[in-house]
Amino acid sequence: MIPGRVSVVTLGAHDVQAQRAFYESLGWKSSSPGGDEFAAFPLGGAVLTFYRMDLLAAESQSPMPAKDAWRGITLAVNVEREEMVAEAIDAARAAGAEIRAEPVKRDWGGVSAYFADPEQNVWEVAWLPEGQFDERGALIWPY
């Protein structure tokens, strides 16, 4: 049996130092020493890591993706209040993110927006009307 949880999300990065700088400019704290191979950001209940793309491809025995290819994955940050979606997008814009979609009300009842980091990893910032968070800031899924 595999436990139903996500502990670590690792994204391959062509430039780990640039990714570290971008996420630190969002106010996220890296828990790993500087370097060009690996960076880690502990988040509410999971850890986001960046590992140099060629090393990750070799270790996982996977093909190298094109540098600017979207990989069909989005990550999400859920926020406690509706207005925080726009605030987060403004912070991402100030950090140099590419804004993919401005905040809008969605048919599922909440508000969300999308941005891409310097290596085209796409993030959704979302507010769920029923969303609640635990003491670590992790979303308690309401459905």
Image (spheres, helix red, strand yellow):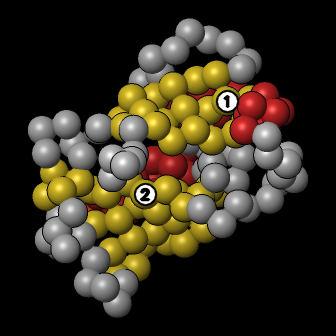
Indicate which disc, 1 or 2, sits on the residue closer to the N terminus.
1
Q: Quadrant of residue 31?
A: top left
How far across and down, in percent of the image, does residue 11 sit? 63, 41
Q: Residues within 10 Å of mark 2 (few under 14, many from 20)?
A: few
Task: Give the residue displayed 13% in from the left and 58% down from the top.
Answer: 132
Q: Position of residue 88 (x, y in %)?
A: 39, 53
**Res. 17 image quadrant:** top right
Count residues near mark 1 (Cα–Cα under 10 Å), then give few for <14, some for 14-19, many for 20+.
Answer: many
Asked if residue 51 is positioned above or below residue 30 in the image, the reply reads below
- Residue at the location (39% across, 47% down)? 2
Residue at the disc numbered 2: 76
**Of the residues shown, which amino acid type is indicated by label 1?**
Tyr
Q: Residue at x 23, y 54 (%)?
A: 139
| Drawn side of residue 118 relative to residue 94, left or right | right
* Nearer to us in this view, 17 or 136: 136
Query: Residue at label 1?
Result: 51
Taking the spot 39% from the left edge, 29% from the top edge, the residue there is 42
Asked whether 116 or 141 is in front, the reply is 141
Q: Is residue 6 left or right of residue 80?
A: right
Q: CA distance from mark 1 to mark 2?
A: 20 Å
SS label for mark 2:
strand
